[in-house]
Amino acid sequence: TVQGVPLSLSLARPAERRSVLELAAGARVETPEHLLAALAGLGIAAADIEVDGGELPALDGSALPFVEGLLEASEALDEAPRRFVVVDSFELTRARDGARCALRPRDGDALIIDCAIAFDHAAIGAQRRRFVLDDGARFASEIAPARTFGLLADAEALRARGLARGASHDNTLVFDDEGPMSAPRFADEPVRHKILDVIGDCALLGAPLCGEVEVVRGGHALLCEVLRAALARGAVTSLSSHPG
């Protein structure tokens, strides 16, 4: 729940390089994806989230501070039965401008993410990683620490469009012509961060997603488009108990 509004994919609005939730009376909450990924990655079924202001804090640019805070409060977490959203009928794919996003059924009760990125920058290049979201500890160690990343050459253009104004070396893995300007946490940190964003966007369904999501050079808007289409065409089923 955000400001008393139940979490729903219908709240998501297209935005460049981030997620945006549009609430009642014109209120908006920007960049909720890292917190939502932390909740989903730890398997937290329900939480009340109070947001003071129009944007979630960037913290260190990853989901790790949210994970650490949630784990500190773990004794108070609700252990009620969970609801699931299951991809159970057919594959659904959208492609645009060299990007592709697909949603397909898979056996089991986990979310499988196959993510690929490709940048002309030599230090990033092409990266691909497959991650199974079935263990909170593995999410906390392998995905949650991956930070937002960007190119130093793009910084001025982004700020001119009102983006990345709070970006710094404290919360962003920045690449200049020589490579990363600070020590990466993983050799493939950029694609791990993309997986983090996918987990956060899928959390907008309001329940854990069981199936496979493939994202190739895609972003928030394309993934949300696929999720909406899956709901509209009956490709997913909402279950009130464990799908297995």
Image: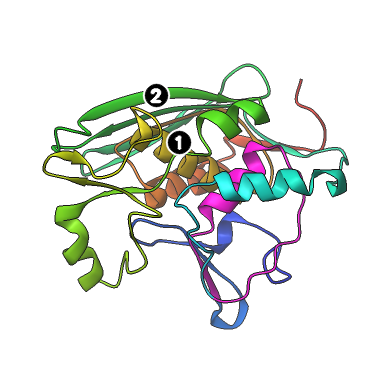
Query: Which residue in the rendered view is the most extreme toward the bottom?
Result: 25
Could you tell me residue 113's position as x and y percent? Answer: 48, 28
Could you classify mark 1 by the number of other residues whose Cα lies within 10 Å: few (under 14), some (14-19), or many (20 or more)?
many
Q: Which residue is mark 1?
A: 195
Q: Nearer the viewer, residue 23 or 3?
A: 3
Query: Vertically, is 5 above or below 124?
Result: below
Residue occupying the point 51% across, 49% down: 228
Magenta region includes residue 116? no
Residue occupying the point 35% across, 36% down: 184
Residue occupying the point 59% across, 72% down: 23
Could you tell me residue 159's position as x and y percent? Answer: 24, 69
| Residues shaded magenta | 28-53
Q: How many marks?
A: 2
Whether residue 102 can be seen here: yes
Query: Vertically, is 185 above or below 224?
Result: above
Q: Which residue is mark 2?
A: 129
Quarter the C terminus occupies: top right
Q: Nearer the viewer, residue 50 or 114?
A: 50
- Which quarter of the picture shows residue 211? top right
Q: Amino acid at mark 2?
A: Arg
